[in-house]
Image (spheres, rainbow, N blue to C red):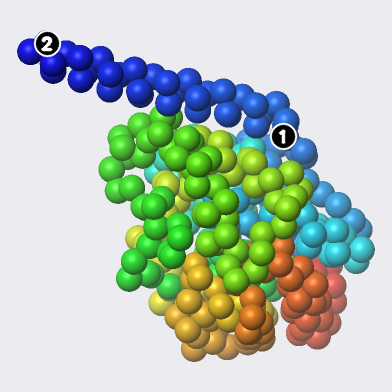
Amino acid sequence: MTLLLVIIAVALAVVFLAWMYTRRVDAAINKQFPPSGKSLDVDGGSIHWQESGQGEPVVLIHGLSGNLHNFSAMESMLAERYTVYSVDRPGSGHARRDVPESANFEKQASMLLEWMTKTGLDRALIVGHSMGGAIALKMALIEPKRCAGLVLLCPLTAPLSEAAGPLKNLYIPNPATRRFLSATFATPVRMRKARENLSAIFAPDAAPRDFATRFGGALSMRSDTFFGAANDIVAAQKSLYKQFRQYGDISCPVGILFGGKDAVLAPSLHMKHIEDTIKDVTSVLLPERGHMVPISDPAACSELVDTIYTKVKDTSGAPVSSTAEK
């Protein structure tokens, strides 16, 4: 009995220390990286975004466990000729998600469309990276007139037979377990394995030395980011089963770009599915690139945005914003 009490006391002490460590890390990151843009409440939470440049509107949607800073290099390039809206998805970065259940792609897409409406952004070219690509596709299915064109960068497009590569440790089916691990052990484990995990996600490309500061890497280490990403990845499979057979309904121009050595999502599945189902597709394969193309090759990604925007103009005969319809 005494031994059991000792074991329980030690276990509680370990949990408490992990909880304290997590709180300190969160506080330090929040202090160093406060919100950089504007926030707006929508049904189910909030959207945080920053604007730059002048011209036709382009919306950038990041992937799993990311934030708007993942697009820092791309945003600078695109802002030379577009008005760029880099957004934090609900439950990521500095955007709020009120309940975990709103991780499903339909809800996230609806929240982003509501944000567009409230900001007076009637119609835009939508760019999505990784899971952001899946949500961009859902936006085009829900309100096709709002999406002038899509640019999908290493997108998640079809149901997976298993969790995505080095991100599989985020798949935690039980909601209570997700919340407990987020508040305690996830942060110390991720801090210890940060370099290893980063290398796996970027492979075969090298992660930039300023990933933590310039590209939002530090924000991805917060406990609420882990919780949001874990909810995202659990919701992903069911969401994809609802939408992946509907892509043939998408009529706007679509560009898809993949790194040929992507270790997170396989081009042979996700790129091919888009090519097989959507009528108007421009495909770009970068044979030696990995998953994080907005950072490793922003020039190629920006070039595809230009290509799809040109197709939008050729199709409509007018710029994106002047053809807007509610």
Sooner in the amino-acid sequence: mark 2 or mark 1: 2
Amino acid type, residue under disc 2 in the picture: Thr
Mark seen at residue 55 = none
| Secondary structure found at label 1 | loop
Query: Looking at the image, which residue is at 31% across and 37% down?
Result: 177
Seen in the image, is 176 located left or right of residue 275? left
| Residue with the mark numbered 2 | 2
Asked whether residue 108 appears in the rendered view, the answer is yes
- Against 68, residue 250 (above or below) is below
Query: Where does residue 122 sit, x and y in percent of width and height?
Result: 73, 58
Which residue is outermost to the left?
A: 1
Residue 257, quarter of the rendered image = bottom right
| Secondary structure found at label 2 | helix
Say which of 184 and 42 sits in front: 184
Amino acid type, residue under disc 1 in the picture: Phe
| Residue with the mark numbered 1 | 33
Asked whether residue 141 appears in the rendered view, the answer is no
Binning the other alpha carbons within 10 Å of mark 2 as few (below 14), some (14 to 19) or many (20 upward) gives few
- Against 316, residue 60 (above or below) is above
